[in-house]
Image (cartoon, rainbow, N blue to C red):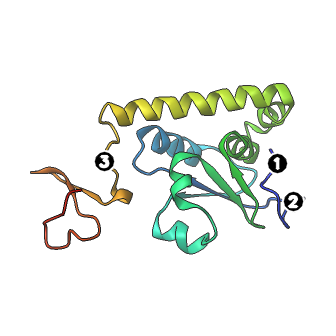
Amino acid sequence: MAPAPGPTVGAPVRRLTVLYDAECSLCTHVRDWLLRQPRLVPLELVPAASEEARRRFPGLDHGATLDEVTAVGDAGQVYRGAAAWVVVLWALRGYRRLAHRLSTPKGALLARGAVLAAAKWRAGQRSAGGNAYRRVDGWVYEPRLGWIYAGPGCDDGTCATG
């Protein structure tokens, strides 16, 4: 459950911000589940790579936060992947014991396996068309037309293809 190295190592966590992929059905399901859980530490859930996330955490690699769950502590601690899931569970009233177990060497293997399984499921969803088009990449969904690329250079509705 160790945060990334830096000046915040050892600082207490009094609040967590969880960055999640708002266009991933699994991620939004987990977000909704987290919102229903009693907490020992306040959680804020913010879409990864959103304007809000970029404003609050300018030093983060926001592209990476779309690929790997990221939690940020109030003192600047950054947790990624399995460590992020463990610290989020630690913040929940009913899951702190489990978080302590998952923070052991053997538990960390289980936590990492769960995160890898979720990543594999997400990748399968993308390759099957479930999340192939992402707003953050410049795609917009028009109900009558489907997904349309409206990224940089497409303001007039025409895009150069490479």
Counting from the top left corner in percent of width and height, residue 5 is at 82, 58
Q: Is residue 123 above or below residue 137?
A: above
Image spot of residue 84 (x, y percent): 69, 46
To which quarter of the image does residue 159 belong?
bottom left
Q: Say which quarter of the image contains residue 107.
A: top right
Q: Position of residue 112 (x, y in %)?
A: 69, 32
Q: Amino acid at mark 2?
A: Val
- Whole-angstrom CA distance, mark 2 to mark 3, is 37 Å
Which residue was labeled with disc 3?
133
Q: Residue at x 53, y 34 (%)?
A: 119
Neighbours of disc 2 within 10 Å: few (<14), some (14-19), many (20+)? some
Circle 2/circle 1 CB separation < 8 Å: yes
The C terminus sits in image quarter: bottom left
Residue where numbered disc 2 is placed: 9
**Amino acid type of the residue tagged 1 in the rendering:** Ala
Residue in view at x 58 percent, y 46 percent: 68
Q: Which residue has dot 1 on it? A: 2
**Residue 111 position in % (x across, y down):** 70, 31
For the residues labelled 3 and 1, the Cα–Cα distance comes to: 33 Å
Q: Secondary structure at mark 2?
A: loop
